[in-house]
Amino acid sequence: MCGIAGILYKGAAPDARVGRALIDMLDGCQHRGPDSTGFSLYREARPGHLRLRFIVGSGADAEVAIERVKAKLAEFQARIVEEEHLGSSYAALIKFDGDLQRLAFEMEHAAKLSSIGESLDIIKDLGGAHDVDKVYKIDKFRGSHGIGHVRLATESDVAPEATHPFWATGFADISIVHNGQITNYYKMRRRLEKQGYFFNTDNDSELIAVYLADKLKHGHTLKDALKTSIEDLDGTFSFLVSTKDEIGYAKDRLAAKPMVKYEDDDIIAIASEEVSLNRLFPGHALNTTEPAPGTFDTWQLSTSA
Amino acid sequence: MATIDLSLTPVRQANELLRKYGADGVDVEVLNPDARHHIGVGLTHPINVHVKGSAGYFCAGLTDGPRFIVDNNVGWGLGDNMLGGSIIVNGNASAIPGVAIRGAEIVVKGNIGSRAGQVMKAGTLLACGNANFMAGYMMYGGRLIILGQSGEKVGQDMTGGNIYVAGKLAEMGTDAMLTDLPAAELDDIRAFLDKYQIAFKGTFQKIVNAGKKLRYARNEPRRRAIPFFESFADNAYWNAKVQEDIHIKSQIGRYRIRGYGAARAMPHISDLAFRKDISIGAGSDPDVICKVHMKTEIGGRSGANPLKLSMPVMIAPMSYGALSKSAKLALAIASRLSGTSENTGEGGMSKEQRAEANQIIYQCLAGRLGWNIHDMRQANGLEIYISQGAKPGLGGQLMAKKVTPEIARIRGIPAGIDLRSPSRHPDVLGADDLVIKVEEFREATGYRIPVSVKLGAGRVRDDIKIAWKDGFDFVELDGMQGSTGAAGNEVLEFVGIPTLSAIQEARDALTEVGGLDMPIVLMGGIKDGIDTVKALALGAHAVAMGTSAIIAGGCIACLQCHVGTCVTGIATQDPEHEKRYNIPAEAQNIHHFLESVRWQIAAVTHALGYSDPHEVSRDDLVALTPEAAAITRLPYAPEYRERQPDLRKAS
């Protein structure tokens, strides 16, 4: 049970204040989820390099987890170019050109994997948008797009790893945020587990990420995957997805979870509530629309279209 | 004209100001609204309010009389439960505009979101643009006018009222049908459009309820009733009750409805015993009530005025509708005499009940039957019903015989239907929405009245954590031994978890999240002061009694509460039956019973060596059965069965 927000600056220059915008939007709907907050940010991609982030906790446990990660990376002959240990997470930029899905599978078993991507960096932790910003300096982040989430845990744990966004396992740079409840969660999860997918949490939203990953693996476009998700997933949901160069949404047929969208020549912004969108334009009434039940869409950065 | 700038003034303060301007008859302009929630909630004066921008959730909710204009869009629940007055929205409205309105006029110039006009009772909701999924869902009355497209499943499960669609009509919802549009109704619609200066010359298709689901096809044949306490007397497998069920189902071809709660044996509070032998100490001191501190405050954790109970016991929620007005009055009087609180249950608050009860909790259910801002303000506590122990996940049921014109008027529904109240709140589809709903109630009542939640025991561990996170002042937790006026027998017997498991899970969950500051009122089969002390020892702050209170007030437990011809005059709306009920005498009986509960609480507490029942703890308890031990993690001590044989038998 949550609030979601996403923004994409359509222009070419990747130096928009995405971090600031996401903090404002998520703070605007923090009442929907005070437990934890997360951001999917897209950093500059470096050819031949991957960004990995893990949730390692704190203290001695963190040191042990980091050592395990490093040992595993060494096995893959991946060289750590940069690293940081902030809050409850450990991030590394590695030089790697092997099989991503195999790396992902092994890394998931080494520690709690938050994200892998050439550009994607999922930062999530307990507390509100401002709390997470204080530790991870989200405010300073500039880029072209991103999505974020505030969470009120209802069935699974309050823990950094159960926080959104979720990474689409095995697929670099894809992440989702979700508001709602997937009622055929166990059925779908078992189906995907049989195909070898690994679930980090009992959070139903993780299922959406893995579901999309599976569709992409089988050659579907993101748009197609969103379309089938509306048929395959049961329950009430509104979710956002982001890739290296696009964002998209899908909304269930029951229209039980809110979603409001604002678009002009420069940006597309989507959030659970208009109050979040209005945070981007204080004092201005916006011309917004609500996506219809059972619909989906995607928007791309103009440079990569 | 006064001005309130929401970029400078928080909404809470702005609403206080709006009410003040309302009382002075001054119109108000609201600047920089920026889609903030709860603008204008709780306003009950006929002033003009101009919102210069977009408003968020529950704009003009819980109001009576004001005239709002919103320049741009609005969020969920526009004009929630508005009794009178008007709203004009120049942009779009999000989901459930006009939810539960009872007479207001609402005009949305743009499109309206899903479930528009859900459970509305009277008044007009107009969309100049398109409607969305399930417009008019479960509406009971009033009219919904749509100039654009209808959206899917228009009129889904509507009970009353009219829907007029000028644009494209999509697939209609269940139990809705098209009918002819009389010329006079078209003239009325045109007059309404003219009043709001909307140029539209087209015509409409009219949708009404098809009447296929309003009544059960066949009523249950009458038989000699097998009373509740004999239902499963000797054999829990094949017995007279099972035989009766099969006979009746063979005639009606559906599930049976009955009153009361789960009758089969299950682990309960009576499976616990006090570790210390109190059989000698208890009862020997005639002044024990003076020696034990029993006063209990509940509901003040976020600054509201708490309920002040003379002992940790409340009257459980039971509706005027399920019960007669006379029975509700007797309960109200008894609650006053014993210094405790009464609870309205689903059917709204009657004037007499309010006058007789010193403290009353006002219950808000999904159908918003009898719910309104004026009675909210008169209440001492508000309660959002999510579900109840007797039938978790289901709404109330009131069979046609009891839906008299008087009951229908209070509830705002058509008379003479088999009322199956909605099970889901229109505006609470998750914990996130619930936060915003609770805030609306607080805004409407100036943060002075405690807001609680009633939970039927199912997934208690998760639910109680959500209740704590959503900031409720207390929780009414209802186990599956809780009774009701009408429910399907299978649901009564087999859905939910026992009261004993419920309190244990709740306590564990609150310990996990550090939420023990949120009090729990435990109900569901609490029959006396001994149960009360045990419930407190397990972690409840107070208990509520329903079944035992009505038995004290004359109920014979025949299980026929739903039929409407209750011979004692308790569960009936038939004046012939009700006149048998002697209000002053039964009020005294209930009062006497509550005083016996008080004495038991005092005697047990004192005998255990404490001066306040809240000091009694788990350390004072043992479990008499392996099941109770497994549920509570209390030591299993079968040897106590010998010491307290009466306790086990009493269960």
Image (tube, rainbow, N blue to C red):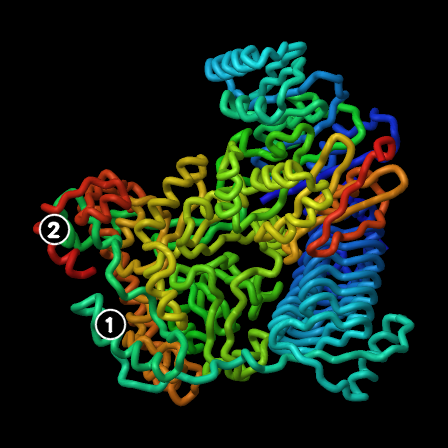
Closer-to-camera residue (B501/A122):
A122
Give the residue pinned by disc 1.
B231
Q: Earlier in the sequence, mark 1 or mark 2?
A: 1
Residue density around tag 1, few if under 14, some if 14–19, many if 20 or more, within 10 Å: some
Q: Is A112 situated above or below B626?
A: above
Give the residue pinned by disc 2.
B641
Of badges 1 and 2, nearer the viewer stands 1
Q: Is B444 situated above or below A153?
A: below
User: Residue A211 at x, y = what percent?
Assistant: 60, 41
User: Residue B559 at x, y = what percent?
Assistant: 32, 75
Residue density around tag 2, few if under 14, some if 14–19, many if 20 or more, within 10 Å: some
- Quarter of the picture holding the C terminus of chain B: bottom left
Q: Does residue A123 appear to the left or right of B70 in the view shown? A: left
Q: Residue at x 25, y 77 (%)?
A: B243
Q: Which quarter of the picture shows residue A87? A: top right
Closer-to-camera residue (B639/A233):
A233
Host chain of mark 1: B
CB of mark 1 within 8 Å of CB of mark 2?
no
Closer-to-camera residue (B43/A195):
A195
Closer-to-camera residue (A289/B370):
A289
- Quarter of the picture holding the N terminus of chain B: bottom right
Q: Which quarter of the picture shows residue A33? A: top right
Which secondary structure lies at badge 2? helix
Which secondary structure lies at badge 1? loop
User: Residue B316 at x, y = what percent?
Assistant: 39, 62
Host chain of mark 2: B
Inspect the image, locate mark 1, and give the three-letter code of the amino acid beneath it.
Ser
Inspect the image, locate mark 2, and give the three-letter code of the amino acid beneath it.
Arg
Q: How many marks?
A: 2
Q: Residue at x 56, y 35 (%)?
A: A35
